[in-house]
Image: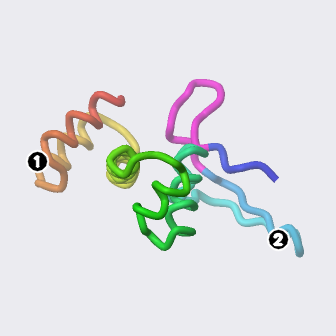
């Protein structure tokens, strides 16, 4: 079974929607619009990092030793992953107007708004 596609292979949009789910046992089918969880929107490399992190009980020191990289390098990777997750979670489904509305309401910072607008 393949991983859920989180980017359109045709146009490259990062906004595909899951519209159908089928039970492998009883074949019941559910149709609608289903949200893709944030973790499934991450790259294979980012997911592997999270799995390693959990296996090391969240110890960056132990993880750095296992991966044979320096602690600061590992910490930088973690910071990048945190930023990626924040952007995935905050990313509205759409338009410049929605982003500006979130900024106006104080729900996102100007820096976050700039990043989101840049990705459009």
* Boundaries of the magenta span: 6-17
> Image quadrant of residue 45?
top right
Residue 104 circle label: 1
Q: Residue at x 35, y 53 (%)?
A: 82
Q: Residue at x 51, y 59 (%)?
A: 50
Nearer to the camera, 115 or 75: 75
Find out whether residue 13 is within the magenta segment. yes
Q: How many marks?
A: 2
Residue 66 visible, this orientation: yes
Nearer to the camera, 67 or 107: 67
Gap between marks 1 and 2 measured at Cα:
44 Å
Q: In this figure, which residue is indicated by the disc labeled 2?
A: 28
Q: State if disc 2 and disc 1 touch (CB < 8 Å).
A: no
Q: Is residue 3 left or right of residue 34?
A: right
Nearer to the camera, 113 or 75: 75
Give the main secondary structure of the magenta stretch. Answer: loop
Q: Residues within 10 Å of mark 2 (few under 14, many from 20)?
A: few
């Amino acid at each position: 079974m393949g991983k859920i596609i989180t980017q359109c292979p045709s146009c490259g949009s990062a906004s595909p929607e899951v519209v159908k789910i089928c039970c492998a046992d009883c074949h019941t089918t559910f149709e609608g619009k289903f949200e893709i969880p944030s973790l499934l929107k991450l790259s294979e490399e980012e997911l592997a990092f999270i799995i390693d992190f959990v296996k090391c009980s969240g110890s960056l020191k132990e993880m750095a030793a296992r991966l044979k990289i320096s602690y600061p390098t590992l910490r930088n990777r973690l910071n990048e992953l945190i930023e990626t997750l924040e952007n995935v979670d905050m990313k509205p489904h759409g338009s410049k107007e929605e982003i500006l509305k979130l900024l106006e309401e104080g729900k996102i910072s100007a820096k976050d708004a700039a990043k989101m607008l840049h990705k459009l």
